């Protein structure tokens, strides 16, 4: 189910307020896993009400860049937000996906996947909240378009929640460890999509009207459980 809040003047604030309202729905003992997109979607977190955070909260990212440069890591950027710093004072846990010394992208993706699966095993009745962004090419997280459906299926097998990728010239940061379409289709209970900028208008309209994963990975929102989109784009 998709809801769309479009043509917004401050989509980041409205998205942050919505995340606060979602957190407030949960009882005090509900385990919650919150995975944030990187990039512009991190701006949402500045508007999340820290008092709304669940007591048993684990925080991480949807997609990680494989790099020894801490300034390039998505998790490092999350750690630098006011949201994370304030949440840390409240005793939250985290899934730290920063690349360790001599760690390969395959090793990072395995560690990332194991952390998610361990959380699911420990909290089978927990809630999973994620934020998703979208690129001008229709990519979301580290899931980029491919030429064919076969290529897409090879990269994202149906038994993996996280994979390692080298997306080549599709991104400045080519080496990734990212959640998969399987993760997005089956794990999040609440998804907040944040899409801003006129350059993304065409890609957003394609994603909303065509469920062709390999051409428009963001179109997976059409088959996810509960999605709300916050955008400054006017959708007619």
Image (cartoon, grey):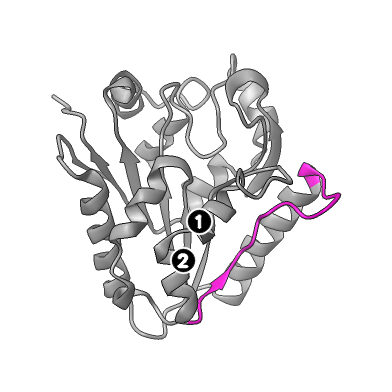
Is-magenta flag for residue 102?
yes
Q: Is residue 119 left or right of residue 189?
A: right
Is residue 136 placed above or below 194 in the rendered structure? above
Give the residue at x 26% y 23%.
Answer: 198
Secondary structure mainly formed by the magenta segment: loop
Distance from the alpha carbon under mark 2 to that under mark 1: 7 Å
Picture quadrant where residue 133 is located: top left
Crowding at dot 1, Cα within 10 Å, few <14 / some 14-19 / many 20+, comes out as: many
Can you identify the residue that label 2 sits on? Answer: 84
The magenta segment = 91-106
User: In the rendered structure, are the residues bearing label 2 and label 1 in contact, judged by CB atoms less than 8 Å apart?
Assistant: yes
Give the residue at x 21% y 29%.
Answer: 233
Q: Nearer the viewer, residue 200 or 191?
A: 200
**Residue 78 — which label?**
1
Crowding at dot 2, Cα within 10 Å, few <14 / some 14-19 / many 20+, comes out as: many
Q: Residue furthest bottom?
A: 29
Could you say where residue 130 lies in the image, as x and y percent from the top left? 43, 54
Q: Is residue 177 left or right of residue 22?
A: right
């Amino acid at each position: 189910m998709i809801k769309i809040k479009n043509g917004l003047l401050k989509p980041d604030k409205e998205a942050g307020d919505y995340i606060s309202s979602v957190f407030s729905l949960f009882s005090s003992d509900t385990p919650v896993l919150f995975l944030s997109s990187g990039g512009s979607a991190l701006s949402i977190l500045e508007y999340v009400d820290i008092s709304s955070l669940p007591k048993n909260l684990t925080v991480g990212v949807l997609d990680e860049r494989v790099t020894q440069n801490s300034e390039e890591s998505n998790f490092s950027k999350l750690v630098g937000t006011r949201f994370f710093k304030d949440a840390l004072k409240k005793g939250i846990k985290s899934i730290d996906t920063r690349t360790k010394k001599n760690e390969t992208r395959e090793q990072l993706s395995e560690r990332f996947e194991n952390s998610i699966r361990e959380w699911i095993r420990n909290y089978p009745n927990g809630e999973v909240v994620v934020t998703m962004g979208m690129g001008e090419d229709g990519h979301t997280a580290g899931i980029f378009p491919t030429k064919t459906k076969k290529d897409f299926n090879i990269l994202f097998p149906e038994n993996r929640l996280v994979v390692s990728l080298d997306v080549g010239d599709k991104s400045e940061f080519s080496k990734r460890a990212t959640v998969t379409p399987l993760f997005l289709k089956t794990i999040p209970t609440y998804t907040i999509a944040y899409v801003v900028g006129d350059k993304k208008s065409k890609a957003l309209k394609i994603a909303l009207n065509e469920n062709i994963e390999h051409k428009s990975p963001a179109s997976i929102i059409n088959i996810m459980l509960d999605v709300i989109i916050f955008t400054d784009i006017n959708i007619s």
